[in-house]
Image: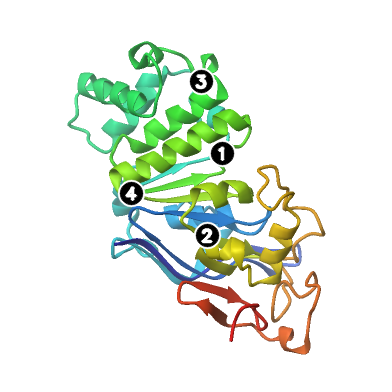
Amino acid sequence: MTLLEVKNLHTHFITRDIGNQVQVAKALNSVSFQVEAGEILGLVGETGAGKSLTALSIMGLLRPPAEIVEGAISFEGRDLVNMRISELNKIRGAAIAMVGQNPRGALDPLTRIGEQIARVARAHNPKLSKSNAATMAVAAMDRVGIADAPARAEAWPHELSGGMAQRVLIAMALINGPRLLIADEPTTGLDVTVQAQILDLLRELVQELNMGAMIITHDLGVVAQYCNRTAVMYAGRIVEEGLTGAVFSQPAHPYTQALIGSTPEKLDFSIDLDEGGGPPNLYGLPPGCHYIDRCPRPADACVRIPSNVAISESHHALCHFAEGSS
């Protein structure tokens, strides 16, 4: 079952310079993908590729000068782009939940943990009593593996470790029973052991609840181990997408090949995708393939926008010369 469908999404930053001339940064350009129930999609790419902006576009959390100028986003068949804010607010935090970066910064330092989680439950069910919401908060904390949840519910944010704070955010995201969970760099700043615990938890929840999930990351190791499908982003476009095993065993786009080739032993968890030159200027993108200036084998055809080339039925790449294509 398809939960989320993004089609031809264009999100731009539209500003004016000191001469009142319109300046457009084309941050997302024709982004399309789906998320199915029971699967985890990994959205991977270097800083500035558009991963977090994709999530904000889906959630309807863009702020000026960011603006969706073209495309469609549907959740369980409902149009999110043109939905009234009052309706969108009923979906955000309930049917679709997001776990962001920096768990400590996301928590209110002046409110106890249990009360913060209960507040999210009551925001989508105003008739819920405070006592019932508090009970739900403790149950949610227990579900995500927080030991002695009743006592932890009385704790203040500064008393939590980074891993514990991330579990609290996941509990907060799950309390209203979402169908789709978007996790934006959910393990940033956590040590490797805690990273694995958090990602194991996310995978278990997706399987147990038949949810859909997106993990946004720059870490290929996370994607390889935890994601059913992988979408590789570069300069606001998805340049390759497919089953994770196929993308890693037969990378077809030169950017994907460079990412995997630069990873120690292919699947190291500490890869830094920002090496090897920066992405193109979003205010002046190349007219054809956005990767042309960094590609090791550019050709005359690359000045034209490439079409998606099918490597297999479930694997495609945005390249005129995608390897493995017929």
First in sequence: mark 2 or mark 1?
1
Separation of marks 4 and 3 at Cα, in angstroms? 30 Å
* Tag 1: amino acid: Gln
Q: Residues within 10 Å of mark 1 (few under 14, many from 20)?
A: some
> Residue shown at 28%/24% (left/top)?
139
Earlier residue among tags 4 and 3: 3
Q: Which of marks 3 and 1 is nearer the N terminus?
A: 1
Q: Which mark is residue 109?
A: 3
Question: Tag 2's secondary structure?
Answer: helix
Identity of the residue drawn at 74% across and 49% down: 264
- When asked about the image quadrant of residue 249, the answer is bottom right
Determine which residue is flagged by label 4: 211
Q: Which amino acid does label 4 sit on?
A: Met
Task: Name the spot of residue 317 as percent of width and height, x first.
Answer: 59, 74
Residue 40 position, x and y percent, is 44, 52
Query: Visible in this render: residue 64?
Result: no
- Residue 288: name its quadrant: bottom right
Q: Which mark is residue 267?
A: none
- Vertical order, 93 against 88 (above or below): above
Rendered image: mark on residue 244: 2
Q: Position of residue 15 (x, y in %)?
A: 65, 63
Of the residues shown, which amino acid type is indicated by label 2? Answer: Thr
Q: Residue at point 73% right, 63% down?
A: 258
Neighbour tally class for label 4: few under 14, some 14-19, many 20 plus, Cα within 10 Å = many
Q: Which of marks 4 and 1 is nearer the N terminus?
A: 1
Do we see residue 38 in this rendering?
Answer: yes
Residue 41 or residue 234, whichever sits in front: 41
Q: Mark 1 points at which residue?
A: 101
In this view, the residue in front, 28 or 169, is 169
